[in-house]
Image: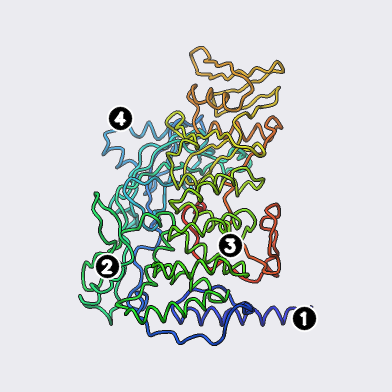
């Protein structure tokens, strides 16, 4: 045991040294592993190249937290009158600004609660984008549950407490919508869970975030700024108002503004890495020599990720040809990094490798699906559609989200915006029946298999006022109860699709539908799989001794025995809630 521990410690020290060397060299390669038999040690000398990364550092790559103080209404007596705090004073000021009648009476109601609201603006977020909103009660609140609540329209800004008063900066977003609380949360036993929730896609961004490059102090000059922008624009351009223009604009001698290239809209981190690996004022001879050097680096899994990224930054036909050779390597990691770079160059040669990886290798699945979604290629589209029928839940849903990112208006996805509240997709695909719901990203329900049915008898709650009652005769009655009026009813078959639609027709919200589905699964009335946020998991490790990992053993590799981590950035498309 002591000998194994010593060996593990030595391996960790070796990996740390390798990472430190890579960082000092301005590259981001995978953790050290035995050299591939395909790699050569007689590499040609690396040309003296001036990379963008040597002269600048990124701007706007952090997440920005914006907050608000607001009111949740529609609670069933589980709210409370907030104590005299700076939060209450701030909410009172906002209510007075909006000319709310008798705000103190409204706050004292048991059907309302003061809440703290926040959302995170990701790098490159644009005006009009929708983001998730987090809602929770303050620590001194007597509110017992936010279930069935509705967050009133809330201004979201960067906030700070100064002089015992809450100060806010510029308003950067607006939040509003139904609060989704964990359906399993019991207010008496899990008050912490019952008093916080999310509004999926309930925040609307009011101002785009800038993305750019800050030129290092020792290199600041208009010439450097212009030369860097020129080199970046030689590689990347976009169409703005129908006109072709470069993505980089030198604003000053110390700052270059960047427009996100559409192909990287769901992978801003990769975009910035590629931009920083662009060479400045490189001669033709130097580029030719560097391509030979990168070809050799690509053949070695130790340097393959960095080499593929730099070849992607070159982006010409010769770079693509080198990457195509990489997709035929005997080393699975080399094949993957080469194919991933080719996908962002929209080259068909990437598709077969990435589709196989998404199907069979959990460690690479996140990046493979995101790369396929970035392509404008019919083979990539067909490959993603074929993954909708596999057994792995995360692969199926990951492929669905990739198709959505590729073209959200694709008729095959059958997108409906039910009740103007959530996206609903009833897919006619083979494979095991499955229902997928989200608790992050955006409110969405996906049926994998349109002809799914509940087993009766059943009794389900869909929020506080809708009851789903199924008898043994194969009929289901969906009823809405309101004080002082006759119940509204819909009689439908056992079809899951019909029940969902009936709940929405009677005024049910997205959280109401999710609650009913979760209860049906827990009670055994829903036979097929029920998954919540079954996203491909990042951070998995890949054991090189296993050439074909089974999709049925996702994430089962022992981290202590793992060889290395994925070296390229996690795409925004599959980020989980912060």
Q: Is residue 466 above or below residue 348?
A: above
Q: Nearer the viewer, residue 166 or 24?
A: 24
Question: Which of the 4 quarters of the picture holds residue 204?
Answer: top left
Label drawn at residue 60 = none
Coordinates of residue 568 in the picture (x, y in percent): 50, 66
What residue is at 29 percent from the left and 42 percent from the top?
Answer: 93
Whole-angstrom CA distance, mark 4 to mark 3, is 52 Å
Assess disc 4: are there few (<14), some (14-19) or many (≥20) residues with their C-alpha within 10 Å of its C-alpha.
few
Look at mark 1 in the image and give the residue it sits on.
2
Q: Which residue is mark 4?
A: 101
- Gap between marks 3 and 1, in whole Å? 28 Å
For disc 1, the neighbor class at 10 Å (few under 14, some 14 to 19, many from 20) is few
User: What number is the disc on residue 256?
Assistant: 2
| Chain-order first, disc 3 or disc 1 | 1
Indicate the secondary structure of the residue bearing disc 2.
strand
Nearest-to-viewer mark from 3 and 1:
3
Residue under pointer 3: 539
Say whether residue 136 is left or right of residue 493.
left
In 3D space, how far apart are the residues under numbered discs 4 and 2 (Cα atoms)? 49 Å
Q: Are marks 2 and 1 in contact (CB under 8 Å)?
A: no
Above or below, 105 relative to 260: above
Depth check, mark 2 against mark 1: the one in front is 2
Q: Residue at x 62, y 28 (%)?
A: 451
């Amino acid at each position: 045991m002591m000998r194994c521990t010593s060996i593990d410690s030595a391996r960790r020290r070796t990996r740390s040294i390798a990472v430190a060397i890579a960082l000092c060299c301005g590259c981001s390669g995978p953790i050290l592993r035995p050299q591939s038999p395909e790699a050569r040690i007689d590499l040609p000398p690396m040309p003296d190249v001036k990379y963008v990364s040597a002269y600048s550092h990124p701007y706007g790559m952090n997440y920005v937290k914006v907050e608000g103080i607001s009111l949740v209404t529609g609670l069933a007596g589980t709210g409370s009158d907030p104590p005299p705090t700076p939060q209450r004073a701030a909410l009172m000021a906002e209510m007075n600004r909006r000319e709310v009648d008798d705000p103190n009476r409204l706050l004292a109601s048991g059907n309302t609660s003061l809440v703290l609201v926040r959302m995170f603006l990701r790098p490159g977020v644009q005006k009009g984008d929708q983001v998730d909103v987090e809602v929770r009660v303050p620590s001194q609140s007597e509110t017992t549950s936010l279930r069935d609540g509705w967050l009133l329209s809330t201004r979201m800004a960067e906030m700070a407490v100064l002089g015992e008063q809450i100060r806010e900066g510029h308003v950067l977003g607006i939040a509003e919508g139904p609060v989704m609380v964990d359906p399993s949360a019991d207010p008496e036993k899990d008050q912490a869970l019952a008093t916080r929730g999310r509004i999926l896609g309930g925040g609307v961004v009011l101002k785009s975030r800038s993305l750019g490059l800050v030129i290092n102090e020792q290199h600041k000059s208009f010439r450097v700024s212009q030369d860097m922008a020129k080199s970046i624009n030689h590689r990347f351009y976009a169409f703005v108002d129908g006109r072709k223009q470069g993505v980089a604009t030198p604003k000053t001698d110390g700052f270059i503004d960047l427009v996100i290239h559409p192909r990287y809209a769901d992978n801003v981190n990769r975009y910035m890495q590629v931009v920083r690996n662009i060479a400045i004022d490189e001669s033709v001879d130097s580029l030719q020599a560097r391509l030979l050097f990168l070809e050799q680096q690509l053949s070695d899994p130790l340097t393959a990720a960095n080499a593929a990224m730099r070849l992607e930054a070159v982006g010409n036909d010769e770079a693509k040809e080198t990457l195509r050779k990489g997709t035929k390597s005997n080393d699975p990691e080399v094949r993957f990094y080469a194919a991933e770079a080719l996908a962002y160059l929209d080259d068909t040669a990437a598709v077969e490798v990435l589709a196989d990886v998404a199907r069979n290798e959990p460690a690479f699945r996140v990046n493979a699906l995101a790369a396929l979604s970035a392509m404008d290629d019919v083979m990539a589209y067909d490959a993603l559609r074929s993954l909708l029928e596999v057994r792995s839940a995360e692969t199926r849903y990951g492929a669905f989200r990739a198709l959505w990112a590729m073209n959200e208006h694709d008729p095959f996805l059958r997108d409906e915006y039910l009740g103007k509240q959530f996206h609903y997709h009833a897919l006619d695909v083979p494979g095991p029946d499955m229902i997928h719901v989200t608790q992050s990203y955006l409110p969405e329900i996906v049926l994998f298999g349109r002809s799914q049915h509940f087993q009766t008898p059943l009794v389900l709650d869909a929020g506080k006022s809708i009851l789903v009652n199924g008898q043994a005769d194969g009929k289901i009655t969906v009823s809405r109860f309101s004080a002082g009026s006759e119940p509204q009813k819909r009689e439908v078959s056992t079809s899951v699709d019909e029940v969902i639609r009936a709940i929405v027709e009677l005024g049910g919200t997205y959280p109401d539908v999710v609650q009913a589905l979760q209860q049906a699964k827990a009670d055994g009335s829903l036979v097929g799989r029920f998954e919540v946020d079954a996203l491909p998991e990042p951070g998995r490790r890949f054991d090189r001794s296993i050439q074909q990992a089974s999709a049925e053993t996702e994430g089962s590799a022992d981290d202590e025995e793992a060889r290395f981590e994925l070296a390229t950035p996690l795409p925004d498309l599959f980020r989980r809630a912060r």
